[in-house]
Image (tube, grey):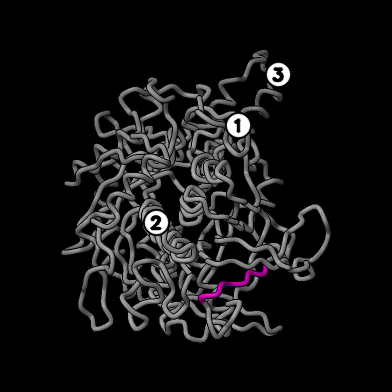
Amino acid sequence: MPEHFAAVIVGSGFGGSVMAYELAKAGMKVCLLERGQAFPPGSFPRSPREVARNFWDPSERLYGMFDLWSFRKSEAVVASGLGGGSLIYANVLIRKPAAWFERDLADGTRGPWPLGYTALEPHYDEVERMLGGQVYPSSDLPKQATTKARAFAEAAAKAGLNPYHPLLAVSFANPGGRPAMGEPLREAEPNLHNAPRSTCRHCGECDIGCNHGSKNSLDFNYLSAAMRLGAECRTLCEVRSISPVDHSDPSLGYEVSCVRHTPLVQVPSSHLPLDVITCDRLILCAGTLGTSYLLLKNHHRFPRISHLLGSGYSTNGDLLAFVMRCRDGTTRPAQPRVLDPSRGPVITTSAQIEFGPGKGGMIQDAGYPEFVNWLVEASDMGGVMPRALRFVMNRIHAWWSANPRSEFGIEISKLLGPAALSSSSLPLLGMGCDRADGRLRLRKARRGNAYLDVDWTSRNSAECFDTLTEWCRKIAVEMGGTLASNPLTRYLQRIITVHPLGGCPMGKDADSGVVGTDGEVFHYPNLYIADGSIMPGPVGANPSLTIAAMSRLIALGIIESWKGCNTSQKGPAP
């Protein structure tokens, strides 16, 4: 007999982790299935050899954290690991503004989301508390650690925006203490890794995995708490198929077939045996791409699912741009302006933009790890080659003339140069309300395999991307630099998104959505979806907090239904 659970959750991102905790806290027997590995502090790759293996493709024996997707007009970057997207996101906790709960309708007009801000407000509060959100403490940090934050904030304000420090899921200080870099972090209860953590070291490594445990990713809060409450969290378990136990009555439960990946055993993933689990309630939280792909691949087992499955795809208006070679206008002649983009968390400051009634976007500073500075400088051939040539010529002259001076540190210093390109440039991240008009479909390959594809183009969202680009240009001018667009976007109109949304949009009925406001799939009782795929449109801000809040709302509805079912089975109290 297969194992049976009250609830099986597929995926451990912002939807699945919140769901697992809430259901376990209510007393339900919960099993969470995560295809990726656990990544405790210190295990995130840094060396070239390790990074080359840090991608997800089990068919090629890769079980890493980064899952890269390439579609016709866009690319997507998502995560694979215990904690999902929280392992690689930039920690930003921003609520979707109340005025933005609108979406584009099929008839060309705009209408409200099926779910408004008021319904999510208490859940926003609770998720912020659980994630330990803290505001970037710029006034309490050394000046060098806040250079890029101050530069961006000053430029955004001069451009006419109102920049601010949003909540970040980062531990800058111990509870009740003052901010301190690298201080041992005190936790009330041990985390699931049983690993020590420290406060933020401002190393800019948030997006490639925090090896110091300063980042409050989901494995340190929601998942650790869920496991203490009895939830089972199984890693390296990839779901291959889902189906109602009884097709004539889906309310009787669901069957989940998955494989257990074995990185140390040389067995092709296609040859792995299937484990079968049954459950009363199945909650899909595998992310926009994972959940949509799973339902599309198993569509024949869910023939009554809404025809809108796969619709409403959005990139959340993601835009990457670069402010290049900023100059300090207060000096004569103007000198390179030092921004130190590798100091601090990846994002520290946000500025909100209004596109029009009911829609807008965000522009934020960005950073990157220190080693990227070396790559940037090495790519600056116009600066490296002349310096290298001068260094070689000077050494040849010294040898030829038998120069008695044996110390040549100054020549090495000149060879390295002023590092003006890396120190005076800064990435900018934009998000906005693009058109959620993409369609996710399965594409058949020659050998019969089915691959996910997206019919989406940025041309239909030109207003969104043009507005974001123009504001980025204004900020670049105020910083004394020039704006360089992402080459893929500029020349090929290809968008790289880290926030794919949609595919199973929320609606009032099966003619307007795949799930209702309670997250339940229309025509399939006890089948739920609680991740970015159910967004009725773009969030416009960083979507992680909204996904988590929506998952909590759905979880409380599931709990209420479960308690009501148990009460009816037991009968009235004597």
Residue 250, labelled with which disc? none
**Region of the chain picked out in magenta, as a range:** 251-257
Q: Residue 389's quadrant in the figure?
A: top right
What residue lies at 17% left-to-right and 63% top-to-bottom?
356
Amino acid type, mark 1: Phe
Residue 391, labelled with which disc? 1
**Mark 1 element type:** helix
Residue of label 3: 402
Q: Earlier in the sequence, mark 2 or mark 3?
A: 3
Residue 556, labelled with which disc? 2
**From the viewer's perspective, is residue 180 above or below residue 256?**
above
- C-alpha separation, residue under disc 3 versus residue under disc 1: 16 Å
Of 168 and 322, nearer the camera is: 168
Query: Which image quarter is the C terminus in?
Result: bottom left
**Mark 3 element type:** loop
Which mark is nearer the camera, 2 or 3? 2
**From the viewer's perspective, is residue 241 above or below residue 235?**
below
What residue lies at 48% left-to-right and 28% top-to-bottom?
199
Please provide percent x and percent y for residue 74. 46, 69
Q: From the viewer's perspective, tell me whether residue 501 is left or right of residue 36.
A: left
**From the viewer's perspective, is residue 198 above or below residue 224?**
above
Q: Earlier in the sequence, mark 3 or mark 1?
A: 1
